[in-house]
Amino acid sequence: DSGVTQTPKHLITATGQRVTLRCSPRSGDLSVYWYQQSLDQGLQFLIQYYNGEERAKGNILERFSAQQFPDLHSELNLSSLELGDSALYFCASSRDRGSYNEQFFGPGTRLTVL
Amino acid sequence: AQSVTQLGSHVSVSEGALVLLRCNYSSSVPPYLFWYVQYPNQGLQLLLKYTTGATLVKGINGFEAEFKKSETSFHLTKPSAHMSDAAEYFCAVRRNTGNQFYFGTGTSLTVIP
């Protein structure tokens, strides 16, 4: 158990819909990262937040957005969903923003868009 | 720019045989290097990491990796494969002045009884 929690574990929805994925980092971790893992794209970094502020952006679509709240939990919002958005979405956390600390991964949310 | 290349998307070894998973990185400065393992239907778990100091790094489950700056490599090895080692392995790099991790495309390890 990494200490990172993600809800829900599974999510099935239809095209055009909007969903919210939730992540709680390990106690004391200030950074949260979101990744998308699919068979054809592999593990893709989406976005990072540090202590409530956006710190780095990766291959995140404009239809996707994220935020980190004062209690440090984070939400990833996916809107106007397409079939291709079906994937595993991972959240990871690390102690701070600029050190060599590793990232600890949550168990993931499996999103299926029908 | 950072990139990580994992040679061989699928590797099969016999139980008891040497495991060698290859990882090469491109970086203008020595980065921090990581190996993660992902078991089916689970998140990624850290195997080992290199930051500074000794270039041979030992991790969990008998795995180790050696940072070779001249070869820009960080290959993962295990002397004797076990059935429980079957999983997806990811190499990752992080610059010592940045935030972002860059993951390789992963290598799926199959262990044959």
Image (cartoon, grey):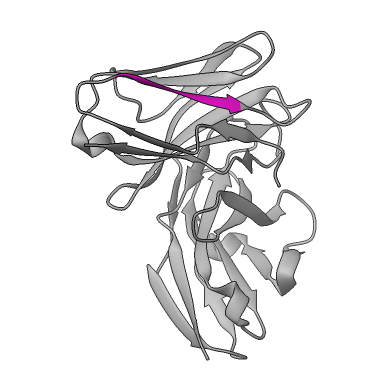
**Residue drawn 73% across the image and 30% down it:** A95
**Residue drawn 49% across the image and 31% down it:** A34
The magenta-colored residue range is A18-23
Task: Note whether A73 is above or below B50 in the view shown.
Answer: above
Q: Is residue B11 visible?
A: yes
Q: Nearer the viewer, residue A57 or B67?
A: A57
Residue A12 rendering spot, x and y as whole percentages: 33, 35
Q: Nearer the viewer, residue B21 or B56?
A: B21
Task: Note whether A105 is above or below B22 in the view shown.
Answer: above
The verdict on residue B113 being magenta is: no
Quarter of the image that includes the N terminus of chain B: top left
Residue B84 rendering spot, x and y as whole percentages: 61, 75
Residue A62 rendering spot, x and y as whole percentages: 29, 17
**Residue drawn 70% across the image and 44% down it:** A2
Which secondary structure dominates the residues rendered in magenta?
Answer: strand
Residue B104 rendering spot, x and y as whole percentages: 44, 53
**Residue drawn 59% across the image and 81% down it:** B83
Quarter assignment of residue A104 = top right
Q: Is residue A11 left or right of residue A1?
A: left
